[in-house]
Image (cartoon, rainbow, N blue to C red):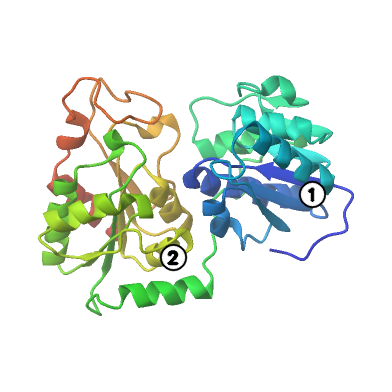
Amino acid sequence: MSAARDAAERILVVQTGFLGDVVLTTPLLAALRRRVPSAQLTILVTPAAAPLVARHPALDEVLVADKRGAGRGVLGVLRLATRLRRRRFTTAIAAHKSIRTALALRAAGIPRRIGFATAPGARLYTTPVARPAGVHDRDRILALLAPLGGVGAAEPAAPWIAIDEAARTRATALLAPLAHGRPLAAVCPGAAWRTKRWPADAYGALVRRLEGDGFACVILGAPDERAITAAVHAAAGGAGLDLGGASDVAVLAAILARAAVVVTNDSAPMHVASALGVPQVAIFCATVPAQGYGPLGSRATVVEKDLACRPCGRHGGERCPRGTDDCMRLIEIGEVREAIERVRAA
């Protein structure tokens, strides 16, 4: 982050959504800095997401709000509003569509509040902006710049995250048990909803196949995904290195940055891999890229099945509405392996 600025314009960007949402908000940060180079630019994120933006060159400050912990509920919104009021922001941009965000910004008395016209709290914004349909969510978020002149067609819009030396060092230590000299395949089998997860036995078979092809496989997951990574590791017959729950998002990024290929579901690691520009294969089960959350970049591809029932919801769910799990079980290991070969050759 840059040094603090003595600027009349103090801009706050709020993105307290999922980790992937934060990654997809980073192009907005860069575009804001280009438009208002002298402004004091701050972002508000969840504690888990802070490492993703802590070193962003467009930012002067990162604020954290634990909306599921001490900051939850009505009192949490009021406390957040009090914090924001003290900082005397002149403009707030709500990249997160929650009513909680709209209420906090209004209660903070920020004079100019930009947010989506379709958000639940849109009436609390001074400048509602149309949320475009049929585009990637990165571009939907960039549409919030419309009151500031919009985004040019040739303007850079790639997501960006940094990796600090401490995270690199920790990643090196965690990967030490793997055989040296083999290309690293990072496998991320988790996702927030079950119907977005390719089955553990399929991932396990893929790990066995990749290890046989000469890759060194690492299986990655958040602390609450330990059971998922353990199931994949077991299905792989113990092949690969199970690091489920062993890394935070900063170390996850440092590991993905070293990978020859990353295989994910529609999940946060997919967006982190996009920001790092590493070859990746994204497996889409219940959701579809057309919803606006597919991987970005020329070194990414999607494996999915064309089924009339997809998507079955905005985020998928815990149960298949038809009781078949077809979107998950019909994806074959050979398809994923072929996709790996394509992205590595790109």
Residue 186 sits above or below residue 36 on the image = below
Q: Could you classify mark 1 by the number of other residues whose Cα lies within 10 Å: few (under 14), some (14-19), or many (20 or more)?
A: some
Q: Quadrant of residue 79?
A: top right
Q: Which residue is mark 2?
A: 251
Judge left or right: residue 290 versus residue 319.
right
Q: Residues within 10 Å of mark 2 (few under 14, many from 20)?
A: many
As displayed, is residue 243 above or below residue 145?
below
| Residue 36 - label | 1
Asked whether the viewer can see residue 150, the reply is: no
x%, y% of residue 188?
31, 53
Q: Nearer the viewer, residue 194 or 53?
A: 194
Residue found at x 58% / y 46%:
66
Is disc 1 placed on a helix, strand or loop?
loop
In this orientation, which residue lies closer to the viewer: 186 or 65? 65
Point out residue 307 in the picture as x, y percentages from the top left corner: 23, 25
Q: Which amino acid type is shown beneath numbered disc 2?
A: Val
Name the residue at 62% across, 37% down. 95
Q: Earlier in the sequence, mark 1 or mark 2?
A: 1
The three-letter amino acid code for the residue at tag 1 is: Val
Query: Residue at 19% of width from left, 50% of height from top?
Result: 203
Q: Residue at x 30, y 78 (%)?
A: 176
What is the x, y in percent for residue 278?
A: 39, 59
